[in-house]
Structures are given as C-alpha cells and as structure tokens.
DNA sequence: AAAGCCTATCGTAAATTTGCGATAAGCAAT
DNA sequence: ATTGCTTATCGCAAATTTACGATAGGCTTT
C-alpha cells in the first residue's frame, strides 16, 4: 500500500458511509445488531451464548460497532448493557437511503 | 482464525447484506458507484483519470464491485463499459432499507 | 502479421481483519 | 481485603485487503 488513503480527499458523507458499511460488512455484526434491535438492548454475555464464538471475539465485534457509532454501552455492574445508538442509526439509515437514491 | 465462518449458519439475507456492505465499505468504491450513477455508465479509463490511483487498483475495485453484483461490464472494444446492475442495486437497496426498519 | 489501445491479471509488500486463549480490569458483595 | 462475576485488552497466527508496477490478453486497425 504505497499510496495512503489520506492522500485522496473524499467527501465527508462518502467517508461516513464507508465506515458504516464497513461495520455492517460482517455477518456476525449484522446478527448482533439484529439481536439488539429485537431485544432493544442486551449484555455481552447474552451474545456469547447466542453465537458460537469466543467471548473475546464477541467483545471485539462490539468494539467495532461502538467505534462506528452504531451502538453504545451502559454500565450496569457487573454487566454492560449495549443498545443501538439511535442517532447514528438514523444517520446511517439516511446515508444509505440517500446513496441508493 | 481458527473458527471458520462456514461453521456458523447465518440467514441468507444476512450473508447477502454483509457482502453488499463489504463492497460499499471503501470510499473509492463508493465514489466509483456514484460516478456510475451520474454518468449512467463509464469506461475503466475514465475512472483512472478521475481517481489518483493506479490502473490496476481501479481494475481491482471494479472487479470487487462486479463480484458483489453491483455493477456489470459490457465489451465495447477496445474498451469496457461498466454500468450499475440495476437488479442487484435494487436488491441491495431493499436489504439495507429492510435492515434499518 | 504487426502495432496500438485498453483492461485484466500476476506477483509482491504492507496493512488490516478475524479469530483464539490467556490475562487484566472494574465493580459488588462478602 | 478478598472473592466472584463480567467484560475488555493483549499477544499471536492466519487470512484478507489494498496498493503498486510489470506483464499478459483481447480486439481493431493498419
């Protein structure tokens, strides 16, 4: 990768949409989001039971979804409750809709 | 990656959506698709002039978009005309819309 | 048959992603 | 202060992605 992405200037919307798309580009993350939509919220442990993946792997996917802004975590000691970040969810929804015309 | 993706069974729609999202997860590919939407169609060479990327890199992005089904190529010797694949475009649109409720 | 365009593919390198087990960290209750 | 529960982070390995230059392939035209 000789030429860095930074050297190309993309529109802000394009960069945002690409980030959201990247977060949605793994079936496990899609499934996690679906689960969060149904349950409205859930704990990391719940997901570990639902998916045949290591706890660390689930945690990593959650981190990516959080970094993308699609979910947010709330401390409910000793657990952490994850929910959809509705603001950014709407933003993503809008960007995708806009993109497809 | 000890545990392969194949061992987890996802819904067909989830897998499809993940593939579309992956194709959209790079700003260059989003920009290419936007360009195709505006121009309705274009040649590989056009894109090489628009983006500061090597011809081989553009070609690779086009290949991924083609593999994802979002575009299709038509031989117009000595060029190749790329257009949006409207069927799959609509499919992707629907899947994203459905996903976001 | 040869030359010229245009695009795909190959080979390579660097970066990123995905997965795991092991360990650390945070908080509550004992 | 220690134990217990839950989740994040670390370290590693394998796979994939992204980028490039160089080369090959396809089709026209000369």
Image: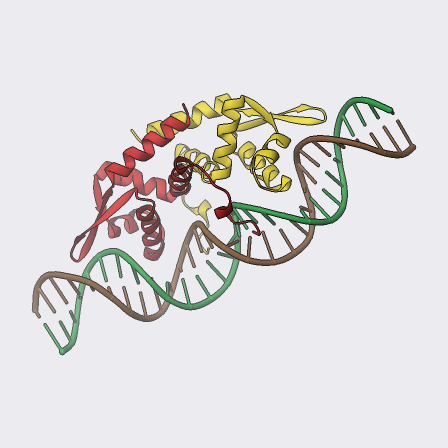
Chain colours: A red, B yellow, C brown, D green
Residue B69 x %, y %:
52, 30
Q: Is residue A29 left or right of residue C13?
A: left
* Residue shown at 50% from the left, 43% from the top: A8
Residue C30 x %, y %:
7, 69
Q: Is residue A8 left or right of residue A77?
A: right
Residue A99 x %, y %:
41, 28
* Residue shown at 40% from the left, 32% from the top: B13
Is A81 in front, or is B42? Answer: B42
Q: Is residue D28 left or right of residue C6?
A: right
State whether residue B85 is above or below residue D5: above
Quadrant occupied by the C terminus of chain A? top left
**Total labels drawn:** 0
Is B88 in front, or is B36? Answer: B36
* Residue shown at 62% from the left, 42% from the top: B54
Q: Is residue D1 left or right of residue D10?
A: left
Residue A51 x %, y %:
33, 47
* Residue shown at 30% from the left, 42% from the top: A70
State whether residue A35 is above or below residue A47: above
């Amino acid at each position: 990768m000789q030429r860095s992405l930074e050297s190309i200037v993309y529109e802000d919307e394009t960069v945002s949409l690409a980030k959201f798309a990247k977060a949605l580009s793994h079936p496990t993350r899609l499934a996690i989001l679906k689960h969060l939509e149904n349950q409205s919220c859930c704990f990391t442990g719940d997901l570990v039971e639902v998916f045949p993946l290591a706890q660390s792997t689930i945690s990593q996917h959650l981190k990516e979804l959080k970094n993308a802004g699609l979910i947010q975590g709330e401390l409910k000691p000793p657990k952490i409750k994850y929910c959809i970040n509705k603001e950014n969810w709407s933003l993503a929804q809008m960007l995708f809709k806009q993109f497809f015309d």
